[in-house]
Amino acid sequence: MENRPILQSLFYNAPGKDEYPPKSSSWTNALYDILSCVEANTDANNVIVIHKNSKFVCTYDKFPKAKHHLLLMCRNYPANPSCLRNVMSLNDLTKEHLEELREFHQFGRSIAAAICGGDKSTSFKLGYHAIPSLHPLHLHIISSDLDSPCVTTRKHITSFASMFFVTADEVENHLESAFVESISLDVRKERAQDVLSNTPLECQYCARAASNVPDWKRHNQICPMIEAPSKKRRGDQQEEVFNSLLGWKSTEVLTKSSGRSKKRSREDQESGTNDTLK
């Protein structure tokens, strides 16, 4: 397919923070500012873009939480045929999005593979924050090391090293399990907040408990289990994986007054969540 090119290799070269577009109004519009920059500067030398096609664009994360950290988004221009263009978060997804979502994820996997090349010491995981701080929908393509100066808080760690990080496979498998047409994915927000706030700070390689963030970061760089063969971690390629933070909600409700079915209004996805990962 046109939007599934075979990539041989990609060179990861993150730009400086001063090379990103200035914020237009609020930090909550940061991804829209980046998407606008992508469409305004379509030449191949846009330093914040590592790869793109006619539907999707992959950019460097301005505040990376690992040695490699990218964001994959749907390009924001009127003629883009992708049904993901107006999707704000996981809560907007239905089974109708599944085919396009698979293409989106496969494009992300091809980028991760092209960066790794033959280097088996670098592994990536692909997924979403259960409660995102920013819209629109964006897929994190992040190396498993979580080694970065930008990791400064407990939530920076648990947002990528717990069930709060919903993997691409988990989203696909959940949508595949839809049992009727009139339902959409629903993130269990209270449970997700609890996971983000209360997941213990443990080494992702050996499960050593850390006393605080600096202690976790020091051990994360020297853990003797880093190079040792181990079972797959969450986010690695697996089959039939599910995430208990994902549920279902009806897309239609029956009004008592008229007896007619009408579309359910979108939930307030930003209430109490905008500063989740700040």
Image: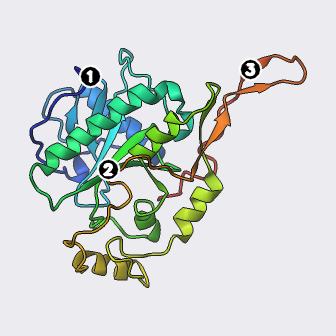
Q: Residue at x 31, y 24 (%)?
A: 55
User: Position of 187 compared to 6: left or right?
Assistant: right
- Is the Cβ of the residue at disc 1 closer than 8 Å to that at disc 3? no
Please state which of residues 266 and 144 is positioned toward the viewer in this rendering: 144
The quadrant where residue 82 appears: top left
Give the labeled residue for mark 1: 54
The quadrant where residue 254 appears: top right
Residue 162 appearing in the image: yes
Outermost residue to the bottom: 211
Q: Residue at x 13, y 30 (%)?
A: 44
CA gap, disc 1 to disc 2? 26 Å
CA gap, disc 2 to disc 3? 39 Å
Residue 119: x percent and y percent? 11, 56
Q: Amino acid at mark 3?
A: Lys
User: Position of 87 compared to 63: left or right?
Assistant: right
Q: Residue at x 55, y 63 (%)?
A: 195
Query: Mark 2, mark 3: which one is toward the viewer?
Result: 2
Which is more N-terminal, label 3 or label 1? 1
Q: Amino acid at mark 2?
A: Gln
Residue 24 appearing in the image: no
